[in-house]
Amino acid sequence: NTEESITHYDHKWVITEETQGSCAEKSSVIYKCLNCGEMKIEYGNYNYQVHNEKYLTKKQTIAPGCETAGTYIIYCKILSIEFAESGF
């Protein structure tokens, strides 16, 4: 009875694609493992800087408190959609 040793490799991630994001989509980084080919995606934040301020309006919906973050709505005039954000 002989046992074979199987070598285990750690993932070796490389970036295959990056996106800056927009007011409609979060930024993202796509990685691929050089050893096994597995893919993974990490998401970042929305990128409101892609628009000039004249295209965005911000309206506070809940004021921040001592222990809670406030929330607000950002409206994009280009896409005609609203986004809820918190943490200000």
Image (cartoon, rainbow, N blue to C red):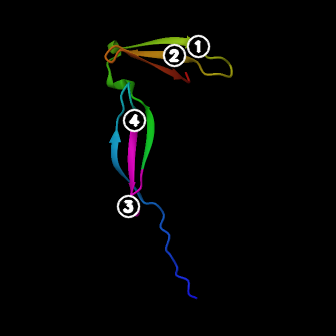
Judge whether 27 appears above or below 66 on screen.
Answer: below
Name the residue: 36% across, 32% down: 21
Q: How much space separates mark 1 and mark 4, taking CA atoms? A: 26 Å
Give the residue at mark 4. Answer: 27
Residue 72: mark: 2
Give the residue at mark 1. Answer: 62
Type of amino acid at the residue the image marks with label 1? Ile
At label 4, counting other C-alpha atoms closer than 10 Å, the crowd grade (few under 14, some 14-19, many 20 or more) is some
Circles 1 and 4: CB distance less than 8 Å?
no
Q: Earlier in the sequence, mark 2 or mark 1?
A: 1
79 or 58: which is nearer to us? 79
The kind of secondary structure element at disc 4 is strand
Type of amino acid at the residue the image marks with label 3? Leu
Name the residue: 61% across, 17% down: 64
The kind of secondary structure element at disc 3 is loop
Hey, which residue is sitting farthest bottom in the picture? 1
Displayed quadrant of residue 22: top left
Circles 2 and 1: CB distance less than 8 Å?
yes
At label 2, counting other C-alpha atoms closer than 10 Å, the crowd grade (few under 14, some 14-19, many 20 or more) is some
Q: How much space separates mark 2 and mark 4, taking CA atoms? A: 20 Å
Q: How much space separates mark 3 and mark 1, taking CA atoms? A: 46 Å
